[in-house]
Structures are given as C-alpha cells and as structure tokens.
Amino acid sequence: MANSMMDQDILKVLYTPEQIRARVQELGDALYEAFQGRNPLFLGVLKGSFIFMADIIRACQVKSDLEFIAVSSYQNGTKSSGVVQILHDLQQDITGREIVVIEDILDSGNTLFFLKNYFMTKGAKSVTIVTLLDKPSRRAKAITADYAGFVVPDEFVVGYGLDYAQQYRNLPYIGVLKPEVYTKRAD
Ligand code: PRP
C-alpha cells in the first residue's frame, strides 16, 4: 500500500493492523463465550465505531443482530464538551434486549455514561460495554468497560475509525497525531 499524505501527520504508530486484528479476534472469542445462545444486539456508536463494528461482529459468530446510534460530544475539538447529542437515534425497540455496545474509545466517559443510562431507560435487559481503546487517565464519569482492547496513554489517537475533525478515520492502523496538527487550529 502506498504511503499516504496522512502518514506525515502521525507521530507514531501505536497498533499495527496485524496487532488490531489479533486483539479483535481475542475480544470476539470472549464475546462468543459470553453471548452464545443469548441473541445479543450489537449496538455501534457512530461514527467512530464503524470499522471496529464491522470487524468484531465477524470475529464473534453468535446469532445476533445489529443497530447503530450516532452521537457527538466533541464538535470538532479535542476536548469533550460533556454534552452528548443524539444525531441519529435507535430505529428499533430494545426492550428486553441484551445490548453489546461497540465503541472505538472510552475517554472522558461522557458518551458511554449517557448511553448506558439511555439504553436502560429504553428497557434494555443488560448493557455490556466493549471498547477497542480505553483511556482511563481522562475519565470524568464513573463508567468502566466490560471488554477493552487496548489501554492507551493520554495522547490524541486517530485511525481505524477514530478521527480528528472527521479525518484520518481510514488509516488502517491506530496512531498518535502530531500535536502541531491540532494546535494549528482554534478549538
Ligand atoms: C468519540 C468516540 C466516542 C467518544 C468517547 O466520539 O467515538 O464515542 O468520543 O469519548 P468520551 O468518553 O470522552 O465521551 P465523537 O463525539 O468524537 O464522535 P465520532 O464517533 O463521530 O467521532
């Protein structure tokens, strides 16, 4: 694959495509053990989770269905605003369902704290949180992942679905963005 212009904005690669693939399979195996026979609803949090969602559902061959919700709390900045907006709501009744939330990153926790409560008030039987990346050093809300792929340091990570100002989502690896890329613009 040709090197992209985007690579020049990356300080270092944290996880290669091969490392991600191997870890996603381990998570898929653990979810298979936990959810086989329970008909879970995999619920992806857009946009960041779309690549992880596509990979994790294929790594976990349980009878299941899937749904998406789109939320945002960053509004193109690098800090969570704390206010979670639903941009695209659930399109089905989740009453009594075992929800497996698929997230790309658990950072301040604002998003998943809000969503876990939201899904419970909508009648979910259970809410299990699966995040590819966990950044516990920035947690502002009392929320933990049930399954986490990698614990990451407090650096600005992009790729494999994660963005900065909607870009870099299509990088096949997860990398740290050079600080000059996001300090160039006013948040
Ligand atoms: C990102 C990410 C998570 C959330 C995590 O979403 O995809 O949903 O932030 O951060 P938190 O734990 O501090 O709430 P963002 O709002 O940037 O939208 P996106 O998924 O469309 O990139």
Image (cartoon, helix red, strand yellow):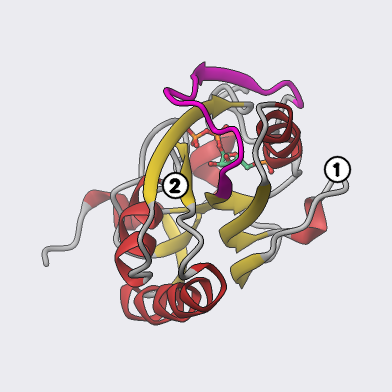
Q: Amino acid at mark 2?
A: Ser
Residue 81, can we see it? yes
- The residue located at (48%, 43%) in the rendering is 43
- Using the image, determine if residue 16 lies above or below residue 50: below
For the record, the magenta segment spans 82-99
Q: Nearer the viewer, residue 130 or 183?
A: 130
| Residue at (46% x, 78% y) in the render | 23
Quarter holding residue 10: bottom left
Q: Quadrant of the C terminus?
A: top right
Is 129 located above or below residue 150 in the figure? above
Secondary structure state at the residue bearing disc 1:
loop
Res 160 seen here: no
The amino acid on which the numbered mark 1 sits, given as a three-letter code, is Lys
Q: Is residue 108 left or right of residue 16?
A: right
Image location of residue 16, percent across then percent down = 37, 75
Q: Is residue 85 magenta?
A: yes
Specify the label residue 49 is tagged with: 2
In space, the residues marked 1 and 2 are separated at their CA atoms by 20 Å
